[in-house]
């Protein structure tokens, strides 16, 4: 279901342009508008889910599709060998600013731990 008030649903709908680099039945991936690393890709489900807290039993497949996309994109972007990070923020306190779940895929530089 597309939500008119959701930035990422509008990208899915083609209403807002994005550099889409991966598509599957369940998910799409596009480059982050404000990259925090040489490669910074957002992987989102086609179905609107606001936060991890809103996942339901039965959403395992859609969540899994985000990680399978991350694996393929990391390979495609040449990150698989050196390493990369996938992270999903949940809620404002964790830095979530767009309330349509998305996996950040970051790589191409040394990534410190713990994150800020
Ligand atoms: P988060 O803070 O975890 O909710 O991450 C949201 C990310 O989305 C943030 O890194 C910036 C990115 N972003 C926000 N609006 C747009 C947009 O319109 N296009 C693209 N490509 N990225 C966006």
Image: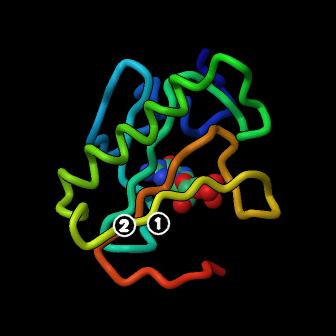
User: In this rendering, is residue 74 above or below 82?
Assistant: above
Nearer to us: label 1 or label 2 = 2
The residue tagged 1 is: 34
CA separation in Å, label 1 and label 2: 18 Å
Q: Element under label 2?
A: strand
Q: Position of residue 76 (x, y in %)?
A: 18, 51
Mark 1 or mark 2: name the one nearer the start of the chain.
1
Residue lying at 42% horizontally and 29% vertically, measured from the top left: 27
User: In this rendering, is residue 45 above or below 80?
Assistant: above
| Ligand 1 under 8 Å from disc 1 Cβ | yes
Local crowd at mark 2 within 10 Å, few (<14), some, or many (≥20)? many
Which labelled disc corresponds to residue 86?
none
The C terminus is located in which quarter? bottom right
| Left or right: residue 94 compared with residue 98 | right
The N terminus is located in which quarter? top right
Residue lying at 75% horizontally and 63% vertically, measured from the top left: 94
């Amino acid at each position: 279901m597309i939500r008119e008030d959701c930035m990422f649903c509008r990208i899915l709908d083609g209403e807002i342009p994005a550099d889409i680099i991966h598509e599957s039945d369940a998910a799409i991936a596009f480059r982050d508008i404000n990259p925090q690393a040489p490669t910074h890709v957002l992987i989102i489900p086609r179905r609107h889910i606001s936060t991890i807290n809103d996942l339901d039993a039965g959403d395992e497949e859609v969540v899994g599709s985000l990680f399978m996309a991350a694996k393929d994109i990391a390979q495609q972007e040449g990150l698989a060998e050196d390493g990369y990070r996938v992270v999903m923020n949940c809620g404002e306190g964790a830095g979530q600013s767009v309330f349509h779940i998305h996996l950040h895929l970051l790589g191409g530089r040394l990534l410190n731990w713990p994150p800020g």
